Amino acid sequence: MPTTQSETKRKSAKGKAAPDAIKLLKEDHREVEGWFEGFENTNSAAKKQKLANQICLALTVHTQIEEEIFYPACRDAGLELDIMDEADVEHDGAKKLIEEIEAGKPGDDHWDAKVKVLSEMIKHHVKEEEQRDGMFAKAKKADLDLDALGEEMQMRKDELMKAAKRSN
């Protein structure tokens, strides 16, 4: 049983306490990294398709919660515009590749290469966010309520994942 009002409030739709915003985003990063590794280590077309679908959905939801909630909060807290603008451009590039991957299938020309390039783009983006002086470090130093942001992001993530499952 939660002991404080904030613990009670910070429940996700699944009933678990929502992580702070940065922890949530890092958990997403680790999950997708594992799927990219699995993709690289299999020759099974069916497994590649399943992993690509998981990667594309997770990244679509992840970028959406960053763009709708986390990035605006960072901008409002005064994080440098250049670091935020770079993240936006990286997201745009990833979205284009995700669209191409979702429109294709294993065996299509350049399909595996697109997943590989997406992996490399995401590795770069994650490094930019997570490095010692990166966006996450700057967000921690800024006047942001990371717990409240995490709660809002978790609720939105749950909502987007539920909607995606309904449409499949």
Image: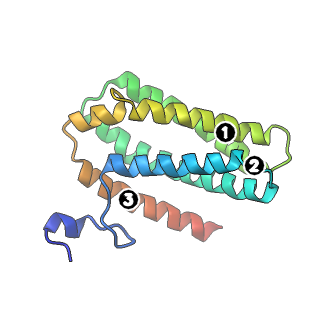
Q: Nearer the viewer, residue 122 or 152?
A: 122
Mark 2 or mark 1: whose residue is earlier in sequence: 1
Q: Relative to 62, say whether 46 is above or below.
A: below
Image marks 3 and 1: residues in contact by CB distance under 8 Å: no
Marked residue nearer the N-terminal end (3 or 2): 2
Query: Between residues 72 and 112, which one lies in front from this camera angle?
Result: 112
Q: Residue at x 30, y 33 (%)?
A: 137
Disc 2 marks a residue whose amino acid type is Ala
Determine the CA span between mark 3 and mark 1. Answer: 25 Å
Left of 102 or right of it: where is 79? left
| Pointer 1 local density, CA inside 10 Å: few below 14, some 14–19, many at least 20 | some
Res 75 visible: no
Q: Tell me if residue 81 comes above or below residue 52 in the rendering.
A: above
Which kind of residue does numbered mark 3 sit on? Gln
Query: Percent position (x, y) of residue 81?
Result: 35, 24
- The amino acid sitting under disc 1 is Leu
The answer to whether residue 67 shows anywhere in this view is: yes
Labels 3 and 2 touching (C-beta < 8 A): no
Q: Is residue 80 above or below residue 120?
A: above
Local secondary structure at mark 3: helix
Chosen colour scheme: rainbow
**SS of the residue under disc 1:** helix
| Label 2 element class | helix
**Farthest bottom residue in view:** 1
| Quarter of the rendering occupied by the N terminus | bottom left
> Mark 1 = which residue?
97
Q: Which mark is residue 154?
A: 3
Verify CB contact (< 8 Å) between mark 2 and mark 1: no
Judge depth for marks 3 and 2 and give the one in front. 3
Quick one: which residue is furthest to the front in this view?
41
Residue at image coords 25%, 54%: 148
Q: Calculate the distance from the C-alpha at mark 3 to the C-alpha at mark 2.
A: 28 Å
